[in-house]
Amino acid sequence: MSDPRPEAVIDPSRADPVLKKQSKSQSEIAWEQFRKHRVALIGGGVLIVMYLVAAFAGFLAPYGINEYRTRPSSAFRPPTQVHWTDPETGRLTRPFVYDVAQERDPITFQRVYVEDTSTRYPVRFFVKRPEATYKVLGLFQSDLHLFGVDDPARIFLWGTNNLGKDVFSRVLYGGQISLTIGILAVWVSLFLGLLFGGLAGFYGGWVDEFVMRLVEVLSAIPGLFLLVVLASLLQDPRNPLARAFGLQMNSAQTFLMIVIVLGFVGWGGLARTIRSLILSIREMDYAQAAKALGAGESRVLWRHLLPATASYVIVDLTLAIPGFILTETGLSFIGLGPSEVDTASWGLLLRDATARGISIQFVPWLLIPGIPIFLAVLSWNLVGDGLRDALDPRKRR
Amino acid sequence: MFAYIVRRLFNLIPTFVGATLLAFLIAQLVPGDFLAQRALEPNVRPETIERLRTQFGLDLPWPVQYVRWMGSLLQGDLGLSFSSNQPVTNLILDPIRNSMILVLMSLVMLYTMAIPLGVFSAVRQYSAADQVVSAVSYFGLAIPNFFFAQVLILGLFVLRSWTREAFGFNQLLLPVAQMTSSGYLDWPWYRQAWDIFLHALMPAFVVATAGIAGFTRVLRAQMIEYLSSDFIRTARAKGLGQRSVTYKHALRPAIIPFVAGIGGILPVLIGGAGLVEIVVSWPGITPTLLEAISRQDIYVVLGLVVITTLLLMVGNLISDLLLAVVDPRIRYD
């Protein structure tokens, strides 16, 4: 990114040669540093692609999130093979798939699917399927899909689960939950962390003592327990919160609740960091000067102390997002996340692979939803590390 | 030192009371209880419910319940389980012991793998091996451990199908589920111990992965910083060998955060072990907890939370004491 400010305004003949170039702002320096961090840039690119895919999941996914057929059942179908070459001539052709028929292996009684090579079903692009409508960015209805095949054939790029739901479509939709929940939860814990950490560091005394005790108590209870107990109790339709929302929580409310629970469990570390930063910044000359000039308490806190913690907080939060993503997928994995009804968190999809009576060796494609979790967490970590280096003046390159 | 330990122990009391109170409050959020569930069953008489309610003290206000529960806790009694009518202590001891087997094994793995790896990549900074270690540790940090466990299980199955084709060897290299094999009860103790060890290897490694990756990275950074510091130059100038400089002079200060971190790593390991326990059906804390929650067996839930909280606080204390041993700059007077 080039310097957007017009340099021509300053007359080069009159300007002092040293001043000819305007000095860079903090964020410009940080961005310049960040750009030099190749891995972090790659991580950022991967994230942008993933978030775009999640945003347009409805269009990219050939099937609806809960679409399945019982007759003929398509349970546990392995990934559909897309043929690129003509089997007779061996030449490259327009991609097509075959319909499959379910049979039983005579010895192991395992379900096997055999291709019926009599009819070819070409892969069509920009198909309209009224069975699978979706809302584009939550705004308007559409039933246009990037690709699809004609009935009765079906195209399952990553196979199907025990009910015959398309894993590929569900992974795309799952990103909408799993990728956003971390970002939202970070705001909750940012709010709590800033509030409590700021208060503790600024006022000290009994406020500090109380807040730090609270953080200690929270961290004394194993986090997973707190999460599991909170999530399961709040999802119980009889509890007061659930009743306030209406008896049965719908998926959006469960989602919101998980966000709050995650943020609530995760703010302690941030509060501690902010408190110790404020304690040291409060004694610095400029903060003392502001106080001496008659600035009020809240002005010193909001204008002088909290902004100074910004770079730490940004890095802390960026590195907290992958943690929240991992926690959310873990919660969904044990069935306490957003429910099955019309969402598909990646953790929930992985749960299919451990269902009772399933041996993973026969349905390895059910593990595919783990890969995007891994990619998202990895990329957020890379971006966070890049940001930390970029914002740290000692690591300038 | 003794005075310090006593002071620390006293400091634990408010934290403990706060944590149990919080857990108790959260459990009280549910308006119904186990007995309300039970009352819906047609063959249970209302009088029985009433009797049980008085017996468990559920008709009292919650502060009274908490004080009563705390009182019996101090006598080592965690109350009765509603669903099985047994003392909670009997129900949760085995799961806690089983989880501890996993957690301690992964703790051992963590230290025996992270320290050599960290030292190695710091000494060979920017070498190919160092880059590989860095890359692998990024992977280790990013992979969710329940997914990693599933992948390893799949890998073991695939390995078996290969060895079966190649050598007719139709055995899994490591057991992938449960904690014991069939026939376990008839074996002598050393074979039982070996059996549990084999079952724990894979899950313990999975639980330790993120920790190994994180520790390796931090230790590498610490070692690099110390290896370029003045006292190391002095040590080298005095003619000390590479080995002595690395292990005696640089490693000792670099290791301090890890000793301090044992207290912090324990809850992470216990939490992480939970999901892995579910994948490999390890009879540990988390499966028991989930079952107790689904049955609204509040005293079992609270018992598990209390015991693990206690374990964590003791772990923190131990790491503080170890820190005093490793770091001579810390004085506890």
Image (cartoon, coloured by chain):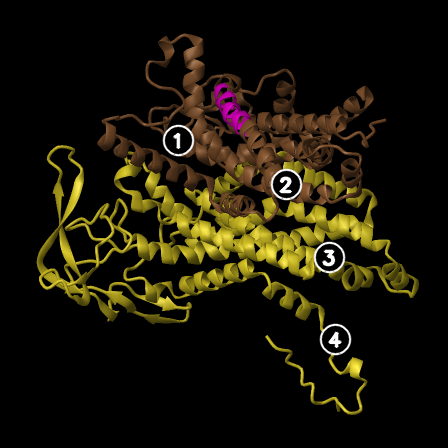
Chain colours: A yellow, B brown
State the residue at coordinates (35%, 51%).
A341
Q: Are marks 1 and 4 on the same chain?
A: no
Residue with the mark numbered 4 = A23
Residue type, numbered disc 2: Val
Chain under callout 1: B
User: Cβ–Cβ below 8 Å for labels 1 and 2?
Assistant: no
Q: Secondary structure at mark 2?
A: helix
Kindly identify which numbered label has been placed on residue B280.
1
Kindly identify which numbered label has been placed on residue B123.
2
Q: Which residues are magenta?
A: B94-106
The percent coordinates of residue B80 (x first, y second) are 51, 20
Q: Secondary structure at mark 3?
A: helix
Q: Quote the CA–CA distance across marks 3 and 1.
A: 46 Å
Q: Is residue B274 visible?
A: no
The percent coordinates of residue B101 (x first, y second) are 51, 23
Position of residue A98 relative to residue B252, above or below, is below
Q: Residues within 10 Å of mark 3 (few under 14, many from 20)?
A: few
Q: Are marks 1 and 2 on the same chain?
A: yes
Kindly identify which numbered label has been placed on residue A394.
3
Q: Residues within 10 Å of mark 2 (few under 14, many from 20)?
A: some
Which residue is situated farthest in the right direction here?
A: A292
Residue type, numbered disc 3: Arg
Q: Quote the CA–CA distance across marks 3 and 2.
A: 22 Å
Closest to the observer, B120 or B287:
B120
Reply yes or no: does residue B99 show up in magenta. Answer: yes
Position of residue A3 relative to residue B93, above or below, is below
